Amino acid sequence: MPRVEDYAMIGDLQTAALIGRDGSIDWCCFPRFDSGACFARLLGDAGHGRWLLAPASGITHATRRYRSDTLILESIYDCAEGRVRAIDFMPPRGDTPDIVRIVESLDGEVPMRSELVIRFDYGSIVPWVRRVDHARVAVAGPDALCLRTKMPVRGENMTTVSEFVLKPGRRVPFVLTWFPSHQPLPDPIDAEAALNDSEAFWLEWAADCTHTGDYHDEIHSSLLVLKALTYHPTGGIVAAPTTSLPERIGGQRNWDYRFCWLRDATLTLRAMLAGGYLEEALEWRGWLLRAIAGDPADLQIMYGLAGERRLDERELDWLPGFDGSLPVRVGNAASTQLQLDVYGELMDSAYQTRVHGVPGDPAGWSLLKMLLRWLEDGWRKEDAGIWEVRGPNRHFTYSKVMSWVAFDRAVRFHEEFGRDGPVERWRRLRDEIHAQVMNESWCESKQAFAQSYGSERLDAGALLMPAVGFLPAAHPRMVSTVAAIQRELVHDGLVRRYLPDEDGDVDGVGGDEGVFLACSFWLADVLAGQGRVTEARELFERLLDLRNDVGLLSEEYDPVAGRQLGNMPQAFTHLALVGTAMLLGQGHQLRGGHPGAVAG
């Protein structure tokens, strides 16, 4: 069974595919990230859909890389008969999405085999396959896929098979194209021309990066992941291209992340702006403003790629799950939760955009003031918190801190950019929330900020207090909180977000999980703010070492088994990586102010 880290991603800025080290595409959804998968082996077996293209005798050794500054994957396969190079990519979207695979022999005459198993609707629908104009076309309901190659193709056990021999210097292309089944067969594309055009596209995008300094390659690699997770038509960025990759093997913490979270807003904007990607930042801001338009009381924590609100969750009982981890879910019921922190994230994202020199949006400010009017009373509510617990709502510390952020940024908008509003009321609310958190969230027995009011549980979300400017990193209470988190939540040097109970008392789910990679980056940030730069850098370098061979990180990690866990690749993790790299590489301040200064 492949591990999560065995996969590399290719994409066309509207969807993505995951390719294993064995040359098998095991996950792909057409035509959007959140569409039904036509290859779902990732969550089942080959009978649920996959596309294998590899030496027929098997691979004895494989290495792979992305072509520099691109999302073009190159794999070298050693086998008994010689060596083969495979080039896999998805051209940035034209009218229809394509997967292009080119194979060539580097040494020897190598027998090759392609096995194309198409199963629409997450592996549940076997299509009707026929030959049309020198192509193989698979149709079921609204979906159609067309395979074009000059190699002989035949049907075998509900599989489209091609067998051929690669001789040195010979390059053989395969092109798979999705199109709506009611429309005519799309025109063929030239695989080699598409390769050149795709490389030129990515290199042109890379050339716009203005970041200089330490960790440039690591930062740009993660920015490339974020770009690949962008749904170009709207500017929305999905949290991950996958669903139901488990946070613990065999556990039930399996969620659909193919949606856009407001919580990612500030970090995404900062990362893109710091890298010089103004266009991407503006597109993301535009998506945010469109998505949240409406009654402030109806604000959701996540939306669909175009701002859709209904993300109804259901289970796919025909899929056995990744490594037997059930259930497999599509949709996300957390979309209906109240999570107060997103109000702060929205205000901070708007503020950070102005700080980085992006022109203001008067209509956007009116919308933000509406959100603030609701939050004047709404911040007192209990909510589901940053981790989207499915247990009882509570007064979560991080939610209150981010409510403070909302009013703090509103005051800064007035003071720094002349925006209108009831600034004195905002100041009073800001001070009230700050005082309440300092009193109600502080746990004397742990000498730390607790997960929620009156609790003795710790939560790694407290590590973000300096990042948003609530307290300096060197404040005595932050120093004590960091020490407590290192005692209770750190496992093998990496940070768990909290300690879940088997009975689900904390989050309503139950079962254990891995360490949370973003939280580990947050710890490095706070250590740097406390002047413990050597420790911070050591932790950061360790986290970099957890990336797979093509630089990708998922959501969590199992230090015991030494494997990545959760949906892959994870935008939130790569955003945290970018933030820490910029902090350590260039001495940037954290986003709320001066992390090393002790409050007076």
Image (spheres, rainbow, N blue to C red):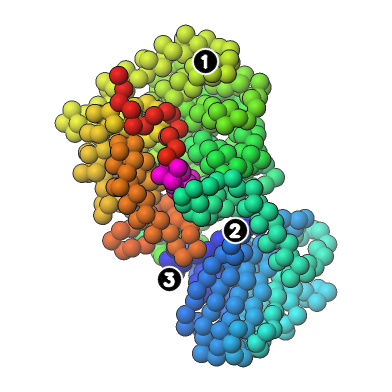
- Residue 112 sits in which quadrant? bottom right
Residue at position x 65%, y 87% in the image: 168
For the residue marked with disc 1, what is the amino acid? Glu
The region drawn magenta spans 575-586
Classify mark 2: helix, strand or loop.
loop
Q: Split into 4 quadrants, where in the image is the C terminus? A: top left
- Estimate how packed mark 2 is, as few (under 14), some (14 to 19) or many (20 or more) residues with alpha carbons within 10 Å: some
Q: Is residue 244 left or right of residue 14?
A: left
Query: Mark 3 belongs to which amino acid?
Result: Met
Q: CA distance from mark 3 to mark 2?
A: 30 Å
Label 1: few (<14), some or many (≥20) within 10 Å?
A: few
Is the residue 495 above or below the residue 4 in the image?
above
Q: Earlier in the sequence, mark 3 or mark 2?
A: 3
Q: Which mark is residue 415?
A: 1
| Upstream in sequence: badge 1 or badge 2 | 2
Tell me which numbered mark, 3 or 1, is placed earlier along the sequence. Answer: 3
The residue indicated by pointer 3 is 1
Residue shown at 66%/82% (left/top)? 162
Q: Residue 589, percent across and down?
A: 43, 34
Q: Residue at x 49, y 16 (%)?
A: 411
| Mark-to-mark CA distance, 1 and 2 | 41 Å
Magenta segment: does it hold 489? no
Question: Can you tell which of label 3 and label 2 is closer to the viewer?
Answer: 2
Quarter of the image for the N terminus: give it: bottom left
Contact between labelled residues 2 and 1, with CB atoms less than 8 Å apart: no
Residue 437 visible (yes or no): yes
- The amino acid sitting under disc 2 is Asp
x and y, in percent, of residue 99 in the image = 67, 65
